[in-house]
Image: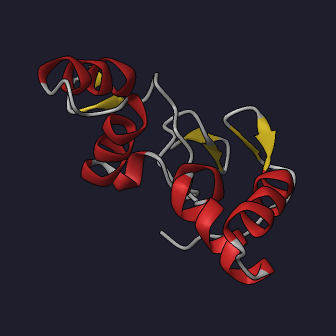
Amino acid sequence: AEMHWDPDVVCDGLPAAQRAQLAMEKRSLSPGMARHSVMGEFPMQFSCMRWDPDVVCDGFKAGERAQQWSLEDSKMSAETARLRVMSEFPLHFGILRWDPDVMCDGHRA
């Protein structure tokens, strides 16, 4: 998924701009490299895809799937488990995701 920088996105409690500033100060990164580093560390916050734990993926809620994968693989973080679910069911999390309740010419899709 394509990523777009947004300085106001909150990444683990801090705005992305503040995280980038810290990366420039502590790791001597250029502004562009610092932004790239933050986006790489928090890809879901900058993606066109958005996590929704209630989306049903092949009969199970996405949140349940991610939790199960985290439990089965103790080295898998919750973030990694969410990314795995989103990568396996990309159409469920993108901008153009299907919504059967959308009205089209007066009829439900």
Tell me residue 105's x, y (percent).
66, 51
Q: Nearer the viewer, residue 5 or 38?
A: 38
Residue at horizontal 12 percent and vertical 21 percent from the top: 72
> Which quadrant of the figure has residue 37?
bottom right
Q: Is residue 104 above or below residue 39?
A: above
Is 10 on the left or on the right of 69, as rendered?
A: right
Residue at horizontal 26 percent and vertical 34 percent from the top: 76
Q: Nearer the viewer, residue 5 or 106?
A: 5
Q: Nearer the viewer, residue 25 or 33?
A: 25
Tell me residue 17's x, y (percent).
85, 58
Is 19 on the left or on the right of 91, as rendered?
A: right
Is 108 on the left or on the right of 16, as rendered?
A: left
- State how the image is colored: secondary structure
Q: Nearer the viewer, residue 69 or 52?
A: 69
Q: Is residue 31 above or below residue 43?
A: below
Tell me residue 107's x, y (percent).
59, 40
Residue at horizontal 53 percent and vertical 63 percent from the top: 40
